[in-house]
Image: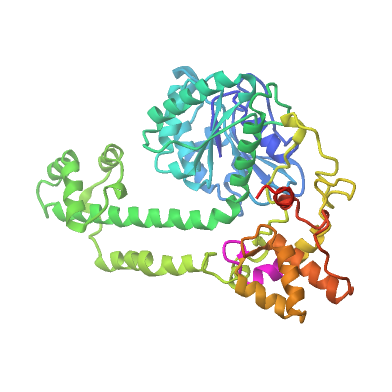
Amino acid sequence: MLVGQYSVGKTSFIRYLLGRDFPGQRIGPEPTTDRFTVLLNGPEERTIPGNALSVHPDLPFRGLERFGVSFLSRFEGSQLPSSVLKSITLIDTPGILSGEKQRTNRGYDFTRVVSWFAERADLIILLFDAHKLDISDELKGAIDALKGHEDKIRCILNKADQIDRQQLMRVYGALLWSLGKTMSSPEVARVYVGSFWEESLKNLDNADLFEMEEKDLMKDLAVLPRQSAVRKINELVKRIRKVKTLSYIIGYLKQQMPSLMGREKKQQKLINDLPNVFRTIMKKYNLSPGDFPDINKFSEKLKDVKFSEFSALKEEQITLLEKCLTVDIPKLMEELPSERDTPEILRQKMGAATINPNVANVPVPLRADKFGKNVEENAANPFGFGAENEDNYWALQDSAERLYDSFQALGPEGGFLPPSVARDVLVKTGLEKEQLRQIWNLSDIDRDGFLDHHEYVVAMFLCDAVIQKKKPIPAELPTSVVPPSKRALLNSRKSGGF
């Protein structure tokens, strides 16, 4: 979900992410996006009215009906075929304005809608314009509505290419100061700095910084689908803990009510003394203060109900909640990928989602020309660089992709094969000890005694050349066989650097 004031670049960022226009797109310096827009993957381009979305059996928007027709008329879906939208769903929100007049003209409670989406979103992006860092009342209200979801929030300082380096330093510091005052959290939110649209940078002073920031943001988005299951379990645990606390509160209030006379007077007394009630319950049942509801909102809701009609606390239900937290949830967590899993178990759990570092998984291709760099010929070619590009061509790229699964099956630790495991693999080739010693010396390029994936590919290539093609082991590796990431290291060794 993207949240921010008008004209900070929310819709332009989505367009950049998708690499194309989408139905219902409106971009301009004035407040153009006047509705909540859900971007969905689908076979054809079309817009879906909000009332239809709220009753769609396959979409999770039925809960939005509580906000009424005035909101649903400002809620729509934008469907289009997109590889990015196959993994994530994007929510574009109306630009936040300042002033009481604009707020009351919306026709619905903006902050409550933002809170509804925040509870269900895996990531919340707050966008700020480098030229207007003021946080309006409505934006502060929206940020307050995100309380409890701080772990999901990422901030973007957009249009930072329009100011120089000194101004950027001051603007960045001012933004962090404003966020610290507004979010009332001791931790500083992660802020990505750059220009997040397809146009080239207007000021190249910070081009390298903006490029690294954009790569970090895209990686953050790329891992989002894999983290979705963990976040859902996290939200489930939070809800169970709150339900458990609420059960104790309701049970206590019910227990304090008289049987016959003075019910209304006793109820009002309990509401007025709610802070002490919370403290009593917290100490009696050893509960955490963070699991209790907001005392002001809760007291307002209690005025509309009758405590005498509450159900009594049932210990067996509390026991079931405890079992869910201590037994069922840990079992569910065991089904998620873990560092302790063997490669075979990891592939079973993740299926097609197993990550191959040789295949790009960032949702948006980065354009070198945007950051003032020369565009490498064939850099975006799925078949890689040609042999004429000596700096980037690697003759073993196809072998690296083919051998990735066999490398993972050997159980690398932190991405490296231990010497004992790598030795057993090489011994099984049947080559003589002296040949294997030469192959190891050529393959272990960084001389750390371990083989990473690329060094493993080089070792297998050399073994195959000796066994299948009857070629002698070279005195040194040809440049085209050395992984591009290790060529500087090898050249430094040759020149006597170390």
Q: Is 76 rendered above or below residue 307?
A: above
Quadrant of the drawing holding the N terminus: top right
Give me the residue at 61% from left, 24% from top.
160
Q: Was residue 357 drawn as part of the magenta stretch in this picture?
A: no
Give me the residue at 63% from left, 32% from top.
210
Q: Is residue 57 left or right of residue 487?
A: left
Query: In the rendering, at what x and y percent does residue 132 appear?
Result: 53, 19
Give me the residue at 36% from left, 33% from top.
184
**Foreground pick, 436 / 25:** 436
Q: Is residue 177 visible?
A: yes
Query: In the rendering, at what x and y percent does residue 298 appear?
Result: 29, 42
Q: How is the image coloured?
A: rainbow
Which region is colored magenta? 404-416
Query: Residue 195's image quarter?
Result: top right
Query: In the rendering, at what x and y percent does residue 71 appear?
Result: 53, 34
**Foreground pick, 297 / 82:** 82
Which residue is the extreme one toward the left? 261
**Foreground pick, 47 / 177:** 177
Q: Is 63 rendered above or below residue 207?
A: below
Q: Is residue 402 left or right of residue 420?
A: right
Query: In the rendering, at what x and y percent does residue 378 appear?
Result: 85, 44
Q: Is 215 rendered above or below residue 478?
A: above
Q: Is residue 443 left or right of residue 266?
A: right
Q: Is residue 109 visible?
A: no
Which residue is the extreme one toward the front? 496
